[in-house]
Image: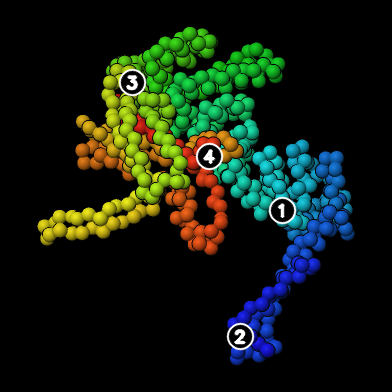
Amino acid sequence: MMRHGCCTSEHNSHSNTKITELDTSPDSDENSCQMTIDNSENILNTLKNLYYDRQMCDVFITVGKKEHAAHRLILCASSDVFRAMLMKPEWSEWHESRIVLQELPQCENVFHLFLEYFYTGKIIITHTNVMAVLALADKYIVKSLTRICVQYMCKHIAHAASHNQLFSWLQYTITCGYVAVAKLCQNYIKWNFESVANTPDFSNFEVDLLCDLLKQSDLIVYNEIVLYNCVVRWLELQQFRLNQLNLPEDDVQEHMQSIVEAVMKCIRFPMMSPCELADLLLSPLLKQYSQILLTRMANAMLYQKGRMNELDMFYTSEEGKMLCTPRLYTCDSFNTTLLIENVPNLPSYTVSTFVFSTHTSAAEYESDKISEWVVDLYPKGVCFKKCFLIVWQGTLEVPERVKSSVRLSLTCRELKEDIKVRVGILLYGTQGGAEHIMQVIQRIHRFNSEDRVLVVDDLIPFEELNPQAGDKFSCLMEPDRKFTKSLYLIGSKRDQLKINIIITPVVNNF
């Protein structure tokens, strides 16, 4: 007997076969009843056993000192390169049952995982082996595995940094055109430069890559002298590496001269205070490379003293404007830190207010110029209360409205003149147990008497700090469901929201 509009399902615990019976409409022929059988798990187990038990293998691949048994059919179905290698006569391997592949040592160590993926669709990826797996996936054109590796890298940049893998990730992804991963690596370095500079991986940075990073105005560092000291440490590491090569002394010095000149062009000496510039006169680097540094330091001192008419014409060029532009400095002159405790338990529409001040110039002669700011932070959404608007026709009622947004409002107090600034908002997170800057939001804004407030909505995805608001249906269906801690929360209990606000002047041509 047919049961109209009914769907039945069976599951055989022994065979792992799922049977779904779908009855047709009342008017259809009874013999047209359809049955869908899902035996995919058994099929996958069969393929897996063929590999593990080396059953009916018809090709044997030697990688390093280890031989791997496989099946031509599986290799050809999984990899474009293996398909060409084993099916096209112009390849010497096409009729061979034993093949020797030349792989890098790190790729040899994961080749069994790579091959096993063909049979199971599963693979263990870690921050230490992902580069080797990706290299194999690229070499043998296994696109699905390439996507898996790239997605993994995008989510684990901080792990790579803490395990000295960041530079190799960056170099490989730039070379191979994986723009998304390369961009994330570059951003992590720029936004966490001081911590990266204290890792062994820092010595592996090539001069061109380092210079590209040093030219960026959104590089985050305490101040320029700290950045200078990081670069000096990198130069010392390059000197040590060159000395290990036992090259002629003249060749070493010539090479060091070229890289010192390249990186020092990117150091913003005008952003250093007169005291810091004076201290550099005693540095060993200056004694050795005085021709490269002295002129730049002298012009920087003129900038600090406001003697613009005496500056070399170089400082009116595009490069000169760059050197006179503050980076995102986290020192007290331009920065404040906001820390909100117990964020998950805050009531809706909570607002936290902070007051702070910043310098309007990096030059010492303008050190008395201060701007005061008020920050209102809404981590739990914004509620606009009901109000009445008086217009010429009468009184208009404006109903209450709620906006589900993590909002930051920045107000300039006691504005005496128009000011144009760059606002950097640094958002912190935790990954692998390490706190780091995971996102930076920047705005260029001109504050004046008619526009005293900068509003930034969706500072953080609302659901990150308010998961119950973004998943109400799931909460009703699964009341015991546990939400994962937001990546944007830090602290031992992962319940603190930390934000830095950096405000630096936008420098025009002088």
Mark 3 → mark 2, Cα distance in angstroms: 83 Å
The answer to whether residue 136 is above or below residue 426 is: below
Residue under label 3:
363
Q: Is residue 16 left or right of residue 280?
A: right
Answer yes or no: is residue 323 visible: no
Residue under label 1:
122
Residue under label 4:
493
Quadrant where the C terminus sits is top left
What label does residue 344 carry, if any?
none
Residue type indicated by callout 2: His
Q: Is residue 199 left or right of residue 101?
A: left
Mark 4 → mark 2, Cα distance in angstroms: 54 Å
Quadrant where the N terminus sits is bottom right
Q: Secondary structure at mark 2?
A: loop
Nearest to the eye among marks 3 and 1: give it. Answer: 1
Mark 3 → mark 1, Cα distance in angstroms: 58 Å
Residue beneath the point at 46% across and 15% down: 293
Answer yes or no: is residue 234 visible: yes
Residue type indicated by callout 3: Ala
Residue beneath the point at 73% across and 66% down: 40
Nearest to the eye among marks 3 and 2: give it. Answer: 2
The image quadrant that residue 373 belongs to is top left
Q: Position of residue 300 (x, y in %)?
A: 38, 17
Residue under label 2:
4
Q: Position of residue 220 (x, y in %)?
A: 46, 31
Residue type indicated by callout 4: Lys
Q: Position of residue 246 (x, y in %)?
A: 70, 16
